[in-house]
């Protein structure tokens, strides 16, 4: 019998069963969808559909070839894009504040909450792809390789996109007030 080798990461459980993967990563997928769609109902729909599609792929032997989170977020990203197209959204971040409907995105850390509220305010200045790369980098704490898998970029392309996004934010006069 072959055993599946799982790379150990601090503070994580092995992703050797789909149930363990679901328990460990549902919140990550939900938060990503919430940051992209800004409505908890839509984020729940995307997260549920993401895990449904992932389960079908997992059972047919088409699970992740590397880390599971980038694989799940790629599925979620495609669903977010589909949802945005169906609703003909002009922007993935509609005007208005952060949806407070379900759960705080930081587990109660007020400094982190303040940062994401600040980010939400200034992210409207960024193109959707630059907003997304900053969310993946700084909220999801993903490395360039994993972000590249999700966005279809090389690691250097991810770094370039992050640099452009940060430069755009730095040029905003509201930041310096």
Image: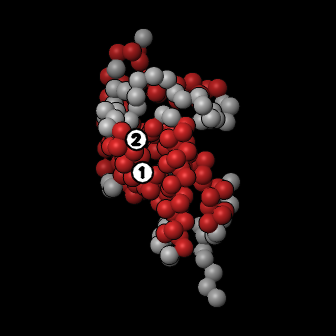
Which residue of the protein is positioned furthest toward the bottom in this rendering?
1
Task: Kindly indicate the quadrant of the structure image that contains residue 1.
Answer: bottom right
4 relative position to 93: left or right:
right
Badge 2 marks a residue whose secondary structure is: helix
Horizontal and vertical percent position of residue 21: 62, 61
Looking at the rendered image, the quarter that the C terminus falls into is: top left
Against 62, residue 171 (above or below) is above
Pointer 2 or 1: first along the chain = 1
57 relative position to 126: left or right:
right
Badge number at residue 132: 2
Which residue of the protein is positioned furthest toward the front in this rendering?
86
Horizontal and vertical percent position of residue 22: 62, 58
Badge number at residue 79: 1
Residue drawn 46% across the image and 44% down it: 136
Q: Residues within 10 Å of mark 2 (few under 14, many from 20)?
A: many
Closest to the observer, 144 or 83: 83
Closest to the observer, 84 or 5: 84
Asked if one can make out residue 165 in the rendered structure from this viewpoint, the answer is no
Task: Kindly indicate the quadrant of the structure image that contains residue 51.
Answer: bottom right
Residue drawn 60% across the image and 52% down it: 26
Of tags 2 and 1, the one toward the viewer is 1
Q: Residues within 10 Å of mark 1 (few under 14, many from 20)?
A: some
Q: What is the count of numbered marks?
A: 2
């Amino acid at each position: 019998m072959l055993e599946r080798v799982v790379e150990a990461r601090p503070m994580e459980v092995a992703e050797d069963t789909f149930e363990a993967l679901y328990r460990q990563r549902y919140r990550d997928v939900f938060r990503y969808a919430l940051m992209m769609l800004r409505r908890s109902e839509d984020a729940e729909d995307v997260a549920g559909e993401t895990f449904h599609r992932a389960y079908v792929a997992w059972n047919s032997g088409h699970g992740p070839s590397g880390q599971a989170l980038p694989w799940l977020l790629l599925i979620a990203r495609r669903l977010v894009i589909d949802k945005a197209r169906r609703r003909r959204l002009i922007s993935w971040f509609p005007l208005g504040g952060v949806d407070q409907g379900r759960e705080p995105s930081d587990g109660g850390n007020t400094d982190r909450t303040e940062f994401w509220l600040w980010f939400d305010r200034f992210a409207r200045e960024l193109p959707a792809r630059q907003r997304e790369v900053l969310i993946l980098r700084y909220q999801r704490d993903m490395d360039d390789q994993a972000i590249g898998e999700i966005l279809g970029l090389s690691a250097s392309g991810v770094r370039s996109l992050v640099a452009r996004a940060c430069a755009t934010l730095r040029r905003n006069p509201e930041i310096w007030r």
